[in-house]
Amino acid sequence: MDSTRFNRSSLPSFYKSVFTVWTLVKKERQKQAVSLHWLLQEPVLHGTIFDCLGWGGPSLSARLQAAGVTTLGQVVELAGPQLQDSAGLASRLGLRSSRVTQQLLDHWKRILSGHECLMLDTFCSGTSKPNAQDPFPLIHLAVDLKDCAGPYLDRCRQVSLQEASGKAFYQLMVKTLNKDKLNGRNDTPWRSHLDLGGSGPAWRSLYKPPLTKRHGDLQWRILHGAVAVNAFISVVNVEVEDRCPFCTERETVFHCFTGCHRLSALFSFLRCVFTAFTEVFTREVFICGFKYTRPKKEKSQLLNFVLGQAKMAVHVSRKRRVEGGETISPVHICVDLIRARIRLDFTFYKMSRDLATFRNMWCYQDVLCKVEDDDLLFGNVLKM
């Protein structure tokens, strides 16, 4: 249905906005009718699949509307289930040319599928009857991308008009209204810096337990380049130099979290941890996160927890240096953060007499820790 053809001037503002939204999105419906009731109710005007405006022109559409022939069911009553009685339809429309009427019927017959024609035959023969309780045919909505593309738009999904949640509709409309701004825009500034190609950040992993919201927020900010490093601060505060607090390089978010020489020990530690988990550590994984999969749930959660603590250690060590505190290696802060969290959870589950849950959460292949005789023992990677 092409709602742009409707005169909406007399409608209340709410319904005007509904039609406005409807024109913005791309609609897809079931290709074949499964309900006789809704097949007979199918409109033959206003931009529907049976509309004849493309070749019949507005005058023929106006005749159909004036004659009260607006649905396929009304056409079937006049022309029969096979849509062959052009005389009956021509008489109703007041057309003298049987050729035009036959062309119109042929147009509708080409659109009908074999199954739909069979449904009309059984209806006219009295074998089947329409059921007004049949559910409305499924309609799916999607972003009308046109010539737009990019990481933010490539992941757009269809939503069902009948079943989608309010959140799904909200996301659909945000991308629809902002598709021009999102066109060609990268989802993260790290994409070009790390040459990510077709891969991307593991967004689902940022907030997965045992990570806390604080760690998830920091990782989100890093991925979006929203960290107050000196390259940014120097722009708004001329008294601050754009140099790294630990070296003479310009401190961008890329340098702060991957380029500074002080991170070499931390990366060596992470490489050992990943090797113990039989995985490969890269700087891309450090920034984007380890992809979460259900078969590797326990491993994925622990590796992303370690990565979250490592990034927090980089952030904390930098903050201490900027504030004039002592210089502490980020690898020591990272290990302390991991050990402290494990020890805290162990104490809780031990007091709760539920060490089985602790083992399931933390003792994957005994890499980070293990429990023996109700005592906590840290793995080799955490013994520093």
Image (tube, rainbow, N blue to C red):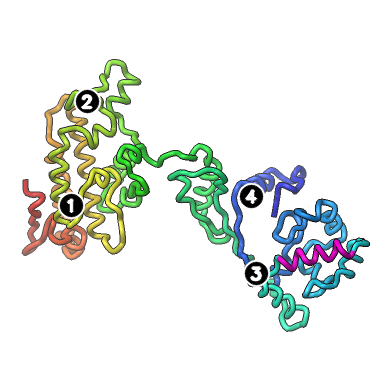
Q: Residue at x 28, y 29 (%)?
A: 252
* Residue under pointer 4: 22
Q: Are marks 4 and 1 in contact (CB under 8 Å)?
A: no
Q: Is residue 344 above or below residue 179?
A: below
Q: Is residue 241 above or below residue 262?
A: above
Q: Earlier in the sequence, mark 4 or mark 1?
A: 4
Most foreground residue, 117 or 363: 117
How far apart in space, not on screen, are marks 1 and 2 (Cα)? 29 Å
* Residue under pointer 1: 274
Image quarter (top left, top right, bottom left or bottom right) of the C terminus: top left
Classed neighbour count for the residue bearing mark 2: other residues with Cα under 10 Å, few (<14), some (14–19), many (≥20): some
* Residue under pointer 3: 33
Looking at the rendered structure, the secondary structure element under dot 2 is: loop
Residue range (magenta)? 98-110
150 on left or right of 86: left
The amino acid marked with disc number 4 is Trp
Q: Earlier in the sequence, mark 1 or mark 3?
A: 3
Asked whether the viewer can see residue 233, the reply is: yes
Image quarter (top left, top right, bottom left or bottom right) of the N terminus: bottom right
The amino acid marked with disc number 3 is Ala
Q: Horizontal and vertical percent for residue 237?
A: 32, 18
Q: Is residue 82 magenta?
A: no
Residue 146 falls in which quadrant of the image? top right
Q: Are marks 4 and 3 in contact (CB under 8 Å)?
A: no
Q: Which residue in the rendered view is the most extreme toward the top?
A: 239
How far apart in space, not on screen, are marks 4 and 1 (Cα)? 49 Å
| Dominant secondary structure, magenta | helix
Q: Horizontal and vertical percent for residue 287?
A: 27, 43
Q: Earlier in the sequence, mark 2 or mark 4?
A: 4
Classed neighbour count for the residue bearing mark 3: other residues with Cα under 10 Å, few (<14), some (14–19), many (≥20): some
Looking at the rendered structure, the secondary structure element under dot 1 is: helix
How far apart in space, not on screen, are marks 2 and 3 (Cα)? 66 Å
